[in-house]
Image (tube, rainbow, N blue to C red):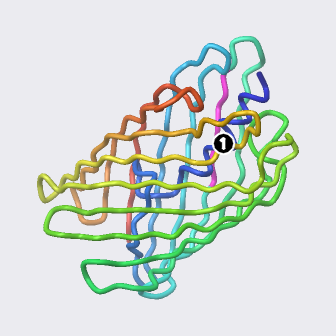
């Protein structure tokens, strides 16, 4: 059962760091010298053998040019297991950059390389116990009130649990601005399974909304549904983003 806990802990870094509650990231950057702070939470369903996880993430981003951001993220996880002691603590801290390398107005392309560090206790399912690296290719197309996003990436996820180390991931999302202050989102994605014994790839779908009462403030809510047994059944998400 500890091994099953680790599968979920390893999958979480593959699905983070976009504009919450999206997993698929956009190509937008903050602008030179500007800051952004994101904080969000996710509560998963209670699985028969795995229990429930509560995940918190906080990300600080700074623009170091009009087309380049750097960021650092710190995750915190609480794992409740029905037959084991509760586990909670800081996960693997990630740092990286987003570079918008092509932009013609409607269509843009970005690259997001990152590193994660073994700050989480891998024996308690809070990290991998190794330094990991990855990169994601980002594409974005905007037409009127619609935004279309697609991501494809790879990560080298070294670990001490005998799991697959080189993984791929892919996702796509559509956003529709129903009001000047409100966007609805649909996001779907999948990734390679870190378990060599499993052929089924973890897959998910997210429905959500982003409300922006001020130009510098976003509030969001989302519902994530697992599309197969290789991830938790469902989860609820909420978050806040501030820019200055």
Specify whether 109 is left or right of 16. left
Residue 60: x and y, percent?
A: 53, 64
Q: Dot 1, crowdedness within 10 Å: few (<14), some or many (≥20)?
A: many
Specify whether 76 is left or right of 43. right
Main SS category, magenta section: strand
Give the residue pinned by disc 1. Answer: 193
Relative to residue 189, is residue 133 depicted above or below?
A: below
Q: Which quadrant: the N terminus?
A: top right
102 and 65: which one is in front?
A: 102
Relative to residue 64, is residue 188 depicted above or below?
A: above
Question: Total number of numbered labels?
Answer: 1
The image quadrant of residue 236 is top left
Q: Residue furthest front?
A: 199
Relative to residue 164, is residue 177 depicted above or below?
A: below
Residue 82: x and y, percent?
A: 69, 12
Chain part drawn in magenta? 74-80
Q: Residue at 71% x, 43% y: name it.
A: 194
Specify whether 57 is left or right of 104. right
The image quadrant of residue 158 is bottom right
Q: Residue at 76% x, 39% y: name it.
A: 196
Element assignment for label 1: loop
Q: Residue at 63% x, 19% y: name it.
A: 51
Q: Which quadrant: the C terminus?
A: bottom left
The image quadrant of residue 74 is bottom right
Residue 127: x and y, percent?
A: 75, 45
Relative to residue 130, is residue 160 depicted above or below?
A: above
Residue 243: x and y, percent?
A: 38, 67
Specify whether 236 is left or right of 56. left
Q: Residue at 39% x, 50% y: name it.
A: 240
Residue 215 is a magenta residue: no
């Amino acid at each position: 059962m500890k091994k099953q806990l680790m599968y979920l802990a390893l999958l979480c870094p593959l699905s983070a760091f976009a504009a919450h509650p999206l997993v698929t990231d956009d190509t937008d950057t903050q602008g030179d010298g500007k800051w952004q702070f994101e904080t969000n939470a996710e509560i998963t369903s209670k699985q028969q053998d795995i229990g429930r996880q509560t995940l918190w993430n906080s990300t600080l981003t700074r623009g170091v040019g009009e087309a380049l951001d750097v960021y650092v993220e710190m995750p915190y996880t609480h794992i409740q297991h029905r037959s084991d002691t509760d586990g909670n603590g800081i996960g693997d801290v990630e740092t990286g950059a987003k570079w918008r390398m092509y932009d013609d107005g409607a269509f843009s392309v970005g690259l997001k390389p990152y590193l994660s560090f073994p700050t989480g206790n891998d024996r308690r399912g809070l990290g991998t116990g190794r330094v990991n690296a990855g990169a994601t290719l980002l594409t974005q197309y905007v037409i009127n009130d619609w935004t279309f996003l697609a991501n494809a990436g790879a990560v080298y996820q070294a670990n001490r649990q005998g799991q697959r180390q080189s993984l791929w991931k892919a996702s796509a999302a559509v956003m529709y601005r129903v009001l000047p202050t409100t966007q609805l989102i649909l996001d779907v994605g999948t990734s390679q399974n870190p378990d060599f014994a499993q052929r089924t790839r973890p897959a998910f779908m997210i429905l959500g909304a982003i409300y922006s009462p001020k130009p510098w403030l976003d509030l969001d809510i989302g519902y994530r549904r697992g599309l197969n047994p290789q991830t938790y059944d469902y989860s609820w998400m909420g978050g806040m983003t501030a820019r200055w």
